[in-house]
Amino acid sequence: MHAARSSHSASAAAAAAAPVSAERLNQPRSQAAFRSTKLLVGGYLGISVLTLVAIVALRNNSADVTSAVWVRGTIVVASALVTYLCAIRAARGSRPAYRRLRVITGVMVVAIAAIIALPGAFPLWMKAEQAVCGVLLIAVAVLVNGKYLRSLFAAK
């Protein structure tokens, strides 16, 4: 009995880790969903990199660039890069990358909401940038948590 359960859980784990078939990924609806996801996450990455460039350019202005701005700007670029890589891998059928994409977008939306809500912790320009990033990530979260993509990545 124990061997049968181990065999079943091993096959379930293998199914959960197996990539989505190319046939399902190449359907027009799948292609459109991932095209939109990569475009939105690419926008998030682009804005994040530009923000880090602005931080470097304004580094001598202590009112606009605090240590919190440096830390947040760096974390956002790293997170945006990881998110973009997950979006690319998910578009190729990786179930683990798809799960990571869902988690990262949710966590980052909550973090952005906290950044915007915290009084005085960040300058207004950074809160505005984070709001734009938040809108992009909310759109990604809606796409990747939608019924279609969830069913595409569901273990069969």
Image (cartoon, rainbow, N blue to C red):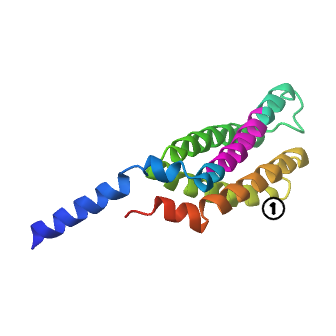
Name which residue lies at 58% across and 53% down. 30
Observer able to see residue 121: no
Name which residue lies at 39% across and 62% down. 155
- Classify residue 2 as left or right of residue 128: left
Observer able to see residue 79: yes
Measuring from the top left, give residue 90's x and y in whole percent: 52, 47
Q: Is residue 46 magenta?
A: yes
Q: Answer with the quarter of the image where residue 82 lies.
A: top right
- Classify residue 145 as left or right of residue 53: left
Crowd band around label 1 with a 10 angstrom C-alpha radius: few (<14), some (14–19), many (20+): few
Q: Is residue 43 magenta?
A: yes
Measuring from the top left, give residue 41's x and y in whole percent: 68, 45
- Classify residue 128 as left or right of residue 22: right
Nearest the viewer among 80 and 65 is 80
Nearest the viewer among 147 and 44 is 147
Measuring from the top left, give residue 60's x and y in whole percent: 87, 26
Which secondary structure class fits the magenta region best? helix
Amino acid found under the numbered disc labelled 1: Ala
Under tag 1, what secondary structure? helix
Q: In this rendering, is residue 117 above or below 76?
A: below
Quadrant of the image containing the C terminus: bottom left
Name which residue lies at 11% across and 70% down. 2
Q: Which residues are magenta?
A: 34-49
Quadrant of the image containing the N terminus: bottom left
Measuring from the top left, give residue 91's x and y in whole percent: 55, 46
Pointer 1 residue: 117
Nearest the viewer among 62 and 75 is 75
Name which residue lies at 82% across and 50% down. 132
